[in-house]
Each structure stands twice: as structure tokens, then as C-alpha cells.
Image (cartoon, rainbow, N blue to C red):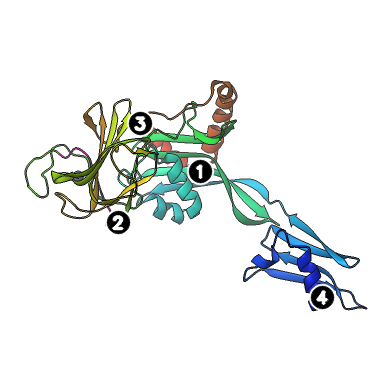
């Protein structure tokens, strides 16, 4: 390309500056005039869907963006969980990005760190994006079912004027006022047990919460919206944060290494905000988060406590949603492989 043509092409791109953001691996296509040899057209292929073309018109170039739309089809996958959601999900050919979404959809009801049982099962109906018959990505999860410890959870994606969200077949939001698991990275250390021996004192000091063993420094998230009522040291708890969520709900996070910026008494927090970091201050034998859930002062098992629903589906939408949900649940059931269906049927009998 002549320096002149390069200049003329770049003049057509001064506003968008796409050519300045070229990345390794992207393709450029040139067309030149056979007789004059000068550039007649230049195309930058950004990815499989998008490209930008500069065409010569007289002495200047025009700029045109082209986007291809992938074809969307419905796909189905199922998995039996013997190890963890991620290990068995991946083994069954479910992409990691879908597994993360599934964990988000069901994470309000199921503690994927501590409450997964051998024999739990998962099935999911989702969109796949195809281009020229080849899969290029996943779209939305349309519906999914998770059977945890004999209990069936079903989630269906539905759009209302408030946006798209997941609901149970009877129209309750999957999203809850509290996150089930306030740490990301977890492994089992001890479960809720009011009569276990305290590991430091070997007495039957009741253990009124759940322990998430996690590396020191792992972020701890506020389980729900609320106001911090305590952030500081308290004997056995070490560094501890207590959040008041209103309506009698309180959560407590102990043995923290330190507090996040802004974590102090009286501060308002939003659900999911990082409030502190896992540590082993106070009476702790190793780094872990000690988490308590209290309703009107009474300790509840955070893994199994029934959490209040966030917001139900608007009434106007419900009459359209219910028949749709019924249809989708039937599609999901009809997609089950014979072995999977048989397994579910035997679960229901027990
Ligand atoms: Zn504990």
C-alpha cells in the first residue's frame, strides 16, 4: 500500500479508530486495481462475526461495518454428579461458562461447596450459536433442573419489563435476598453441628455456624444487603463482621485476616460486596471463614435455612409465564436420556 492510500484509509476511520486497535491474529484483506495498482478496498476481519470494510469512492474511502448473525439452536445436556458440579459437568460435555451460569442460577438454593451429594443430577436446556453449521458459542440457558439430596430445583429464564431473570415453575424468583455461600473458593472443613467438639478446646462447645476452609486472603462477600453493626475484634471470633439485614436477619463472618476498605460500623453494604478476607484470627486452627446466620437472634444452619425470596414475578406476567413454564419443563423432561429418566423415576419413588 502506498503511504497515500494508508493515509486516505485512516481518514475514514478517525472517529472509530478500529484500525488502531488491530490485534494479533486478525486478518486483513486487500483488493487492488489491476491497471493502476492502487488500493480499491481493504477489509479488517475482527472476528468470525464482525468485519470493517473500507472501499475507494473516487479519491476517498468509505467505511462500512458488517456483522453476521449466528443461527441459534436449542441444545440439551445432562450430568450425574459424583464429585463436583465442575468435574462431572465438564466430563458430560457442558462448557465451563455454562457451569458457572448454572452455579449462579442455583447458588441461591444450593451450597455448591458443602452440600453436593453423590448422585445429585443436573440437566440443562440452552441455546447454541452456529455459524456455517459450526458451533461458535453458547447463548442463554433456557431452563435447567438440579436435583440435590433428593430435592428438585427447576429454573426457567423469562423476560419481563424489568429484564431477564430465572424463576421457579410457579413464578418465584430463583434470586434470593441472601447468597447461600459467602466465599468463592471453598473446600469442606466442618459442617453445621451444634454438638461437635471445639477443635481448640475439645469441649462440646456448640458450633453455631458453618466453616468454609479457604486460603488466607480469599475475599468474603456480604450475603445480603444490609448495614454493618460490628466490625472489629471479639475474643474467639478474632476479627469479625456482623451485618444487620433488617426484618430480624443477621449474618456473622469470623476469623478474618482483615477488613475491606469501607467495612466499618454503620456502613451500608450491598449483596455480594467484598467486606473482608479469610484468615485465622481468634480461636481457629487454620484459615477459614466461620459463617453464622441468625433470624431474630436464633442460629440457623446457613446451608439449609430457607431464604426469603427476593421479588416474585410481576402479576401481569404470571398468567403468560405459567403455561410457558409448563411447556419448557415438559421439553426438559422429554429431553432426558432413557437412563437419566429412569434414574430420576427411581429417585422419586424413594
Ligand atoms: Zn466455625
Q: Which of the two labelled residues, at mark 4 and mark 3, occupies the earlier sequence position?
A: 4
Residue tagged 2: 217
Determine contact: label 3, label 2, CB under 8 Å.
no
Tell me the element at label 1.
Answer: strand
The quadrant in which residue 314 appears is top right
Q: Which of the marked residues, 3 or 2, is nearer the chain's N terminus?
A: 2
Which residue in the protein does label 3 denote? 307
Residue bounds of the magenta highlight = 207-216
Q: CA distance from mark 1 to mark 4?
A: 56 Å
- Residue sitting at x 37%, y 28%: 308
Q: What residue is at 67 percent from the left and 60 percent from the top?
A: 48
Q: What label sits on residue 4 in the rendered view?
A: 4
State which mark lies toward you, 3 or 1: 3
Label 4 environment density (alpha carbons within 10 Å; few <14, some 14–19, many ≥20):
few
Q: Is residue 245 above or below residue 211?
A: above
Q: Decide which of tag 4 and tag 2 comes sooner along the chain.
A: 4
Asked if residue 208 is among those painted magenta in the image, a careful observer would answer yes
Q: Residue at x 82, y 75 (%)?
A: 4
Q: Is mark 1 within 8 Å of ligand 1?
A: no
**Between residues 274 and 208, which one lies in front from this camera angle?**
274
Q: Nearer the viewer, mark 4 or mark 3?
A: 4
Instruction: Find the distance from the CA under tag 3 to the CA under tag 2.
Output: 28 Å
Mark 4 lies on a secondary structure that is helix
Name the N-terminal-most of marks 3 and 1: 1
Asked whether residue 93 is drawn in magenta, I would say no
Q: Secondary structure at mark 2?
A: loop
Amino acid at each position: 500500500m502506498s503511504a497515500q492510500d494508508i493515509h486516505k484509509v485512516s481518514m475514514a476511520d478517525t472517529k472509530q479508530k478500529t484500525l488502531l486497535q488491530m490485534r494479533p491474529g486478525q486478518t486483513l484483506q486487500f483488493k487492488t486495481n489491476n491497471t493502476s495498482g492502487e488500493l480499491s478496498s481493504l477489509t479488517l476481519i475482527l472476528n468470525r462475526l464482525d468485519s470493517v470494510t473500507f472501499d475507494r469512492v473516487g479519491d476517498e474511502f468509505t467505511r462500512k461495518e458488517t456483522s453476521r448473525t449466528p443461527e441459534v439452536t436449542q441444545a440439551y445436556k445432562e450430568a450425574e454428579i459424583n464429585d463436583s458440579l465442575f468435574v462431572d459437568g465438564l466430563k458430560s460435555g457442558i462448557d465451563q461458562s455454562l457451569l458457572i451460569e448454572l452455579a449462579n442460577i442455583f447458588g441461591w438454593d444450593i451450597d455448591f461447596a458443602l452440600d453436593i451429594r453423590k448422585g445429585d443430577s443436573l440437566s440443562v436446556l440452552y441455546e447454541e450459536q452456529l455459524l456455517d453449521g459450526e458451533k461458535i458459542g453458547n447463548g442463554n440457558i433456557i431452563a435447567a433442573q438440579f436435583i440435590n439430596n433428593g430435592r428438585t430445583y427447576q429454573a426457567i429464564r423469562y423476560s419481563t419489563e424489568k429484564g431477564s431473570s430465572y424463576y421457579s415453575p410457579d413464578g418465584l424468583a430463583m434470586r434470593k435476598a441472601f447468597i447461600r455461600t459467602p466465599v468463592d473458593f471453598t473446600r469442606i472443613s466442618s459442617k453445621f453441628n451444634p454438638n461437635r467438639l471445639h477443635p481448640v478446646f475439645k469441649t462440646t462447645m456448640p458450633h453455631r455456624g458453618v466453616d468454609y476452609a479457604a486460603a488466607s486472603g480469599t475475599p468474603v462477600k456480604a450475603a445480603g444487603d444490609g448495614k454493618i453493626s460490628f466490625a472489629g475484634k471479639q475474643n474467639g471470633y478474632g476479627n469479625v463482621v456482623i451485618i444487620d439485614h433488617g426484618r430480624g436477619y443477621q449474618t456473622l463472618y469470623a476469623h478474618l485476616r482483615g477488613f475491606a476498605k469501607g467495612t466499618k460500623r454503620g456502613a451500608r453494604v450491598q449483596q455480594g460486596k467484598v467486606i473482608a478476607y479469610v484468615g485465622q484470627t481468634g480461636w481457629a486452627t487454620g484459615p477459614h471463614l466461620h459463617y453464622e446466620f441468625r433470624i431474630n437472634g436464633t442460629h440457623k444452619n446457613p446451608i439449609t435455612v430457607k431464604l426469603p425470596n427476593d421479588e416474585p414475578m410481576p402479576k401481569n406476567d404470571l398468567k403468560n409465564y405459567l403455561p410457558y413454564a409448563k411447556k419448557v419443563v415438559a421439553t426438559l423432561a422429554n429431553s432426558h436420556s432413557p437412563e437419566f429418566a429412569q434414574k430420576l423415576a427411581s429417585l422419586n419413588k424413594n
